[in-house]
């Protein structure tokens, strides 16, 4: 399965780490576009200079880890598409160009299911996608989440629980399943 990751699921660190951990374990092939990565970089400005530097480094690691993940498309593709928010048509174009099966986004209202279905796509929020992967491979998702939990504890110095970390990351179903 190929999954186009929207900016809103790449920007939050723990959510991105959970999704990419599942991808690294073979659950799906991640896709994105240069514009999606640029949007993530712009959003990181809110975190200050250190956040910008960290997002830049992480984006470079994404490019190195998944060199085939970044998709491009001709302008004519985006020009023929329509979504309620025209600023999101680049996401749909990237999904089509990458032959994605699903767009992973928190922004459901701007990606109507019937429009996506016309292009052979579906939509999933990250929590539902990760929960479905957990149902198919609970041990694999537990291993992915354990690594992320250990790293969160190391970086923050806080004694996070699995459930608290994943709930804070807006992943309540997978938090309940793993917590």
Image: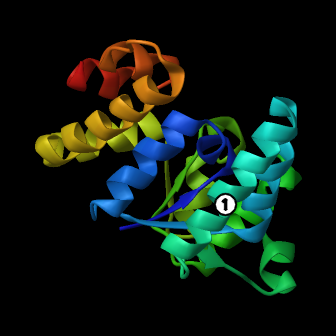
- Above or below residue 139? Residue 71 is below
Q: Is residue 112 left or right of residue 20?
A: right
Q: Nearer the viewer, residue 73 or 37?
A: 37
User: In the rendered image, which residue does mark 1 sit on?
Assistant: 59
In the picture, which quadrant includes the N terminus? Answer: bottom left
Q: How is the image coloured?
A: rainbow
Q: Residue 53's spot in the image, x, y percent?
A: 78, 49
Disc 1 element: helix
Task: Identify which residue, 17 or 154, lies in the foreground.
Answer: 154
Q: Position of residue 165 (x, y in %)?
A: 42, 20
The image position of residue 96, as x and y in percent, is 61, 74
* Residue drawn at (71%, 61%) of the image: 91
Q: Is residue 84 visible?
A: no
Identify the residue at image location x=57%, y=38%: 13
Judging depth in this view, the residue of 83 and 4 nearest the camera is 4
Query: In the image, is 154 to the left or to the right of 31?
Result: left
Q: Is residue 28 above or below residue 13?
A: below
Residue plotted at (33% across, 14% down): 161
User: Do we see residue 109 in this rendering?
Assistant: yes
Position above or below: 162 against 31:
above
* Quarter where residue 82 is shown: bottom right
Which residue: 36% across, 29% down?
149
Q: Give residue 92's position: percent from left, percent from top.
A: 68, 63
């Amino acid at each position: 399965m190929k999954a186009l990751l929207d900016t809103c699921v790449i920007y939050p660190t723990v959510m991105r780490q959970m999704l990419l951990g599942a991808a690294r374990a073979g659950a799906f092939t991640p896709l994105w576009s240069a514009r999606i990565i640029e949007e993530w970089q712009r959003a990181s400005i809110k975190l200050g200079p250190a956040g910008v530097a960290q997002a830049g480094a992480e984006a470079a690691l994404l490019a190195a880890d998944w060199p085939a993940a970044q998709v491009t498309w001709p302008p004519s593709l985006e020009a023929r598409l329509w979504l309620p928010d025209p600023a999101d048509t680049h996401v749909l174009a990237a999904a089509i160009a990458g032959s994605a099966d699903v767009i992973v986004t928190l922004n459901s209202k701007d990606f109507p299911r019937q429009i996506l279905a016309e292009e052979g796509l579906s939509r999933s929020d990250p929590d539902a996608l990760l929960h479905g992967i957990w149902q198919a491979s609970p041990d694999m998702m537990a291993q992915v989440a354990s690594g992320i939990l250990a790293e969160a504890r190391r970086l923050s110095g806080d004694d996070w629980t699995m459930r608290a970390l994943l709930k804070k990351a807006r992943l309540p179903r997978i938090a309940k399943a793993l917590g």
